Amino acid sequence: MASPYDSGSPSHTAIAPSSQRHNTATTPPQNPQIGTNDQLAQPTKQRHRTYDPTHKSPSMDQSRISVRLKNSSESECIERERQALLSFKEDLIDNFGMLSTWTNNTDCCKWKHIQCNSHTTHVELLDLHGNYPYTPYLTGAINVTSLIHFPFIQHLDLSRNYFALSYIPESMGFFTNLRYLDLSRSGFAGRIPSTLGNLLQLRYLDLGKNVLWGKIPIEIGNLKHLQYLDLGLFYISGKIPFQIGNLRKLQHLSLGSNIPLYGWKKPNYISKSLSGAIPFRIGNLPFLHTLRLVGNFDVQAKDAQWLSTLHSLTILELSSLHSLVVTNYRLHLQELYLSHNNITLSSSLCPNFPSLEILDLSYNNLASSFRANFNISSKLQELYLENCSLMDGNFLLSSTSTMNSFSSLLFLDLSNNLLKSSPMFYWLFNFTTNLHFIDLDGNLLEGPIPDEFGKALNSLEYLLVYNNKLQGKIPSFFGSMCKLQILDLSNNKLSGEFPIFTQNSTWCSRHIFRELNLSYNQISGRIPERINLLSELEILSLQGNSLEGDVTESHLSNFSKLFFLDLSHNSLSVKFGSSWVPPFQLHFLLLASCNVGPSFPSWIQTQNSLIQLDISDNGLNDVVPDSFWTKLRILYTLNMSHNNIIGSIPNMKLKLSFRPYINLNSNRFEGKVPFFLLQASELLLSANKFSDLFSVLCGNVTTTNLATLDLSNNEIKEQLPDFWKYVHRLLFLDLSNNQLLGKIPISIGTLMKLEVLDLRNNSLMGELPSSLKNCNNLIMMDVSENMLSGRIPSWVGESIQQLIILIMRGNHFSGNLPFHICYLKRIQLLDLSKNKFSEGIPTCLNKFKALSEENIDRTEIESRIHWYNTTYYENYGVYTDGSYALQVIWMWKGVDRSFIHPELILQSIDLSGNNLTGEIPKEITYMHGLVSLNLSRNNLSGEIPSDIGNLRSLDSLDLSRNHLSGKIPPSLSKIDRLALLELSNNHLSGRIPWGRQLQTFDASSFDGNVDLCGEPLEKSCPRDKTVTKSNGAEVDDKEDNSVLYEALYMSLGIEFFTGFWGLLGSLLLWQPWRIAYLRLMNRLIDYLLLMVALNIVKCQR
């Protein structure tokens, strides 16, 4: 799970500077007259450039933004305001003593981070900016509305804290005297309040790098005094309000962002950003020195003309604006960001940016234009070339190349390119001698890192080479790099034992080294105790290796600053004494698949700052202490699944402010589901022994955050109650494999956001309630294996047309299949088997558009199911692990099998076990994407459609136990992928067609058709010849193929007998061998295709 400031998961980039490069150009202007408190005197370090905190502040008139105040020593603060501040503090979690001076019976004007007016003693400045992810910072469920008692406040800074998922309230508009408001980088969620337009005195507004979505309120255009406006938000969408163009005093404008504040980078994410026309005209925003416009804009010539009038620009970002030309201000630009454009480098570009210090050309195809001697500015310090399709050939050195042409370069990002081998390293040795930061992640680098790398680049502080193919042992030269602070070699193929340099007491970097990430390699052996020499370590990630042995107190006893520990998926045993109190306070603790049990670890109880805890599959066989559950007040994710935890969970009075993800699957919890757990956004309780949920839920108004509820495979034996209106935000509801009784209640139709309803394998009765038609966002509905009855209502096709999966198998549904079902254009899995449906199969099946396509549109499917759109952010925020996956039980080749993520791999129809009559409609042959078709055990008659061979994707076809007649269509033999064929117990006649596939099936596939003949049946057809072999076996041959074979044998002659007789001749003439060989190959190919599909799905989870 990622923090909102990382583009990768914390296990890979918890301190990843490269992911936040666009965030750093300017720090908020600091007022030199405010600095009486230490925390207010210095700007905080930028998230991704911790090595260089000296970036210039914007050159604006700071005195017009700042608040001229001083602490009053003559009179105390107003009591009402002091109590309001103490109330505000109660909702915060202060693990680092930022609010240590905020105590009762003291003067609040003398508290840290507070300043009062010297005359009125009203609080006019509250500066609580933190330094997340470094210390100090605040967390908790911030309650901004408690500040309503400060009508005279002018300066409010809550930036760089960890208020994840807290909303900016509409009441923020009441602070009408505010001149400075900074809420940036603190994990605020929701929409931008339109009431911010009431803050008419505002000079500075920064909401950037939060999880805010939706449109920019037009009311922002009311802020005529605004000089600094940052709405650099990844999820923001819609058009830029033209009213912003009227803010003539603006000096800094940032709208939109290319950096996803989440643990993945979704494809085509720009399409969700700002769009439309750029509304600015010549004369708008004349004083801009910083301009950032990120979106999918409709760029026109007038936009270039307007930009050309901005003569004060020093910082410019124009991402995804494609054809726009940079003109006129090249001499002054210090920072230029042109990612996601169609840029082509040329020699004429280079001399035009003499002052440039930062250049970002990421996400442009530079494969044909970038050269090793590229040099755009002698002052260039930071160069970003992420995802530019660069290859080794782009870094070849020629005799004319100028050595050390990048001598000023400090920061280089070459991530997500196509680099494989040594030319790039050699280029680094010769062109860059003073680098502090290198990001090479996501390339194809192979083999070991050359030793020269460590010798030539001993100035490195950050080295990120994760997600490559590096092999061999971890190089020892890291031990001679005296400035190294962060080393990330995760997701490679490195082997050997734990690196020796980390155990060397003389290593020159051990007192500054902060992050070691070796996860997902092949490191083996034990973790040495001497790792405790790295006393400044903050992040240790070793997951997914082959480490073994014990981890004891000795390993971690010196890590007082450790906040991230991941030992998951090794063969480690964590053995800490029951009374041990660690010297650190972890925020992330990930021990999945480690041996921690059987007792519940008491040392975890001492960790009071945890926001993510994973102790799944830890061999725990104990009761969870009641006091442990209080940690959920600040946790964002809790995973205790796949243990053997017993007992019930106490029904405590807890407020879970952060809508946590809670996974308690596969344990032995019993009794009632406690009240407080229902405040989670995602609650996974599958495979336990819970027996009662609904008495707790009924009338409960605090479950409005609940978006996923999985109570499958429990022991709930009661009727479905009528409480669903209280959980109206539910997206996924899984109550399968319980003992639910009675009818499906009408109130289930109030779940209008519901996307998955799984009631499989219960004892539900009655008809489907008509209110379900209100659930028109349903993607999957599974009511199989119940006792439901009645007809399929027409609204199934008319109202819930988003359905991808509809499973009604094993009930008592009856009547005909209504033609309305053909409105389900997106359907991929339709299972109506084992019911009492009668009459014919609708002829409109060709309207199943998704089944007519040979390939599944994975991008479209994932965008609707896997948290790729703002629907999910509003329900879960961005901290969910998203562990709930669609799962179905499907009859596959005659066997019930469980499929996870079936929407990505299956396209199937099963109408078996009904009373359907009439012919198989020819329209069924238009569904070219069908992988499985089962119409068995009905009363179908007539012939098999002659074009059945058009279903080239078919892997399984079952038409057995009907009354089908006529010949088997020859086209059936053209389906190369067919692995299962059942035509038995019909009235088929004539010869079984000859082809690559049909002779590979057993005779049982054709049994019960008395008039069928030919291979593989023992019954020969009229005029067939019989050939007697030497061993007495008789093999039927085909008269209509005899001439072909005779001509073939004669034409091959001597070369055939001498060259191919040993293998191919045997297979050609000896039919038992041929049939066995083809059958073996068919099964092997079928197995491989299935395994590939399942592995692809696993990798994308």
Image: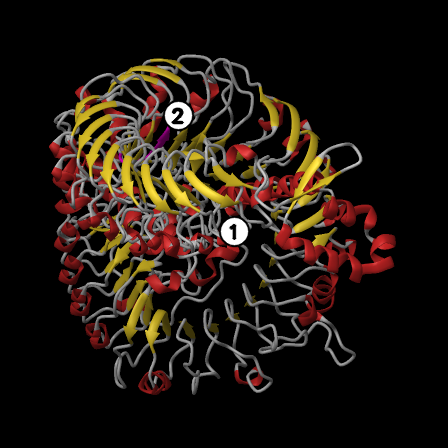
Please give the residue where the numbered disc 2 appears in the rendered image. Answer: 665
Residue 351 placement: quadrant: bottom right
Residue 516 visible at all: no
Q: Quadrant of residue 816?
A: top left
The segment highlighted magenta reads 657-663
Amino acid of disc 2: Asn
Residue found farthest to the front: 1023
Q: Compare residues 327 and 821 and report the one nearer the observer.
A: 821
| Residue 937 - label | none
The picture places residue 140, in percent across and down from the top left corner, at 30, 37
Tell me whether circle 1 and circle 2 mark residues in contact (CB < 8 Å).
Answer: no
First in sequence: mark 1 or mark 2?
2
Q: Is residue 42 above or below residue 316?
A: above
**Residue type at tag 1:** Ile
Foreground residue among 195 and 64: 195
Q: Residue at x 79, y 59 (%)?
A: 1050
Residue at 43% x, 52% y: name it: 948
As for residue 570 lying within the magenta part, the answer is no
**Which quarter shows the N terminus?**
top left
Residue 1058 appears left or right of 566: right
Q: Which residue is mark 1?
A: 975
Pointer 1: residues within 10 angstroms few (<14), some, or many (20+)?
many
- Residue 1024 locus on image (x, y percent): 62, 45
